[in-house]
């Protein structure tokens, strides 16, 4: 069981590296293709939108094969996309390669979440999901800083070749270590789609869009913000990304630990704290030490929401969770795309490189409001169910003698 979760974490490590490393290389890519920083930001937005589209599409295409085989197919697609990016002659081809790689992202994490949860006891599901996502968070401590360093030292194309190699390792890990889990019998497309009629599933996905979108509003433009505002050198961005990654690792582990116990209170604290920290980032970005501490907190608070939101979707879509799980991963990246676009807009409007932090704070605060709404509706539904049960008690079982 631990080895299977390790294999999923390896695949998540490669995917996490390619998703986040572009943020440390935006100036280099923009310079080579002679585009502006906001235009280069479309490499973040395009990837995120590809995840949104690819999550349900690839999950539905994989309904006829085993989950293990589909995970292997997705890793192969990921490798191809990164090779296209590494060899792109023009910006449009680079963007296409990012989209190709992104098509594997949502389905891999969605199917992988279901596989991970199925490997453990019910009370450990969030912890198992968090273990898989540890690969994504560790990518920000090791993969992203290393990829940024390689890109700044020997060229950004080398970074994407390295990422493609990580994808190959992930593919081999899944092939070797993940048990072959056939698609559950009796589950049809209509069962998977039925989950989207559950208002709690939709609210959880909306929280995902807005909450993690708040993180990306700031982090997408971290390089120009830190070099132009805080006064860091370009090479220092590598270590700032390490701090962000360490925060993500810590937040992910805490989220996995407490989501199995106090899921909604955890969301209140993490989303509320994220909104406050992002607001403060507009001030702390002007001081090197304060900016570094803030980046760590953004990573921790942002990723503390991931295991609980993924578990909430799985719980609410019990019986046919695969598509809902994958779509929720797409929701994370829809938030990324939305926030990267909004952040680029406020920068292009002349509001400065710290302006995206206000966008992120507003998104995180909106997610907190939805969390309160979700919890309130759940309590009212539970109270109504108890009231109905009190007025319509189950008939008492007939005595054994009467049944005969």
Image (tube, rainbow, N blue to C red):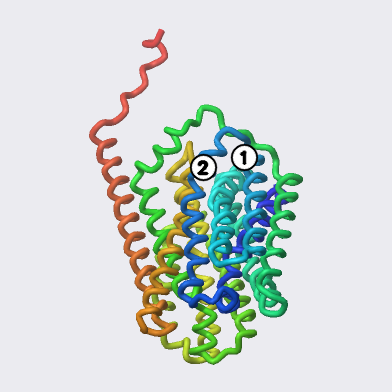
From the viewer's perspective, tell me whether residue 78 is left or right of residue 383.
Answer: right
Q: Work out whether residue 23 or residue 264 is closer to the camera in this orientation and state it.
A: 23
Residue at the far left: name it: 391
> Residue 356: x percent and y percent?
41, 77
The numbered dot on residue 11 is none
Q: Is residue 274 visible?
A: yes
> Residue 239: x percent and y percent?
64, 81
Tell me what residue is drawn at x 51 percent, y 27 percent: 186
Give the secondary structure at mark 1. Answer: helix
**Does 62 appear above or below 358?**
above
> Residue 159: x percent and y percent?
68, 69
Q: Work out whether residue 297 or residue 33 is closer to the camera in this orientation and state it.
A: 33
| Mark 2 vs 1, N-terminal side | 1
Tell me what residue is drawn at x 62 percent, y 65 percent: 89
Q: Where's the C terminus, which quadrant?
A: top left
Tell me what residue is drawn at x 55 percent, y 67 percent: 91
Residue on which disc 2 sits: 322
From the viewer's perspective, tell me whether residue 113 is left or right of residue 207.
Answer: right
**Does 378 appear above or below 68?**
below
Q: Work out whether residue 386 or residue 3 is closer to the camera in this orientation and state it.
A: 3
Decide: few, some or many residues near mark 2? Use Cα within 10 Å; few <14, some 14-19, many ≥20. many
Marks 2 and 1 close (CB-CB < 8 Å): yes
Decide: few, some or many residues near mark 1? Use Cα within 10 Å; few <14, some 14-19, many ≥20. many
Give the secondary structure at mark 2. Answer: helix
**Does 349 appear above or below 62?**
below
> Residue 203: x percent and y percent?
36, 53
Residue at the far front: name it: 89
Q: Is residue 269 visible?
A: no
Tell me what residue is drawn at x 46 percent, y 75 percent: 38
Cα distance between the residues tagged 2 and 1? 10 Å
> Which quadrant holds residue 267?
bottom left
Residue on which disc 1 sits: 67
């Amino acid at each position: 069981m631990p080895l299977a979760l390790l294999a999923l974490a390896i695949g998540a490590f490669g995917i996490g590296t390619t998703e986040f490393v572009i943020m440390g290389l935006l100036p280099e890519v923009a310079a080579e293709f002679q585009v502006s920083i906001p235009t280069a930001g479309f490499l973040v937005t395009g990837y995120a939108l590809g995840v949104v589209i690819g999550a349900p599409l690839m999950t539905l295409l994989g309904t006829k094969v085993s989950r293990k085989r589909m995970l292997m197919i997705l890793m192969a697609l990921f490798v191809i996309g990164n090779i296209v990016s590494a060899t792109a002659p023009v910006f449009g081809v680079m963007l296409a390669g990012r989209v190709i790689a992104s098509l594997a992202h949502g389905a891999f994490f969605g199917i992988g979440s279901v596989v991970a949860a199925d490997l453990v006891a019910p009370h450990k599901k969030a912890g198992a999901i968090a273990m898989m996502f540890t690969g994504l968070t560790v990518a920000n401590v090791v993969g992203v800083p290393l990829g940024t360093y390689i890109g700044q030292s020997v060229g950004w194309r080398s970074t994407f070749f390295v990422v493609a190699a990580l994808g190959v390792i992930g593919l081999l890990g899944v092939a070797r270590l993940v048990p072959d889990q056939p698609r559950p019998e009796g589950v049809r497309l209509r069962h998977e789609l039925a989950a989207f009629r559950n208002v709690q599933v939709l609210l959880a996905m909306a929280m995902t869009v807005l909450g993690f979108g708040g993180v990306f509003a700031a982090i997408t433009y971290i390089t120009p913000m830190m070099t132009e505002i805080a006064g860091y050198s370009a090479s220092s961005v590598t270590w700032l990304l390490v701090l962000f990654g360490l925060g993500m690792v810590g937040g992910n582990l805490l989220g996995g630990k407490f989501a199995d116990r106090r899921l909604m209170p955890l969301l209140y604290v993490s989303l509320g704290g994220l909104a406050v920290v992002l607001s403060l980032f507009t001030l702390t970005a002007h001081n090197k030490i304060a900016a570094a501490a803030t980046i760590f907190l953004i990573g921790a608070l942002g990723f503390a929401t991931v295991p609980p939101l993924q578990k909430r979707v799985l719980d609410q879509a019990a019986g046919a969770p695969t598509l809902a799980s994958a779509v929720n991963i797409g929701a994370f990246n829809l938030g990324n795309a939305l926030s990267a676009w909004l952040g680029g807009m406020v920068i292009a409007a002349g509001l400065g490189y710290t302006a995206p932090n206000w966008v992120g704070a507003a998104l995180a605060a909106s997610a907190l409001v939805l969390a309160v709404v979700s919890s309130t509706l759940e309590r009212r539904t539970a109270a109504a169910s108890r009231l109905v049960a009190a007025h319509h008690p189950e008939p008492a079982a007939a005595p054994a003698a009467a049944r005969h």
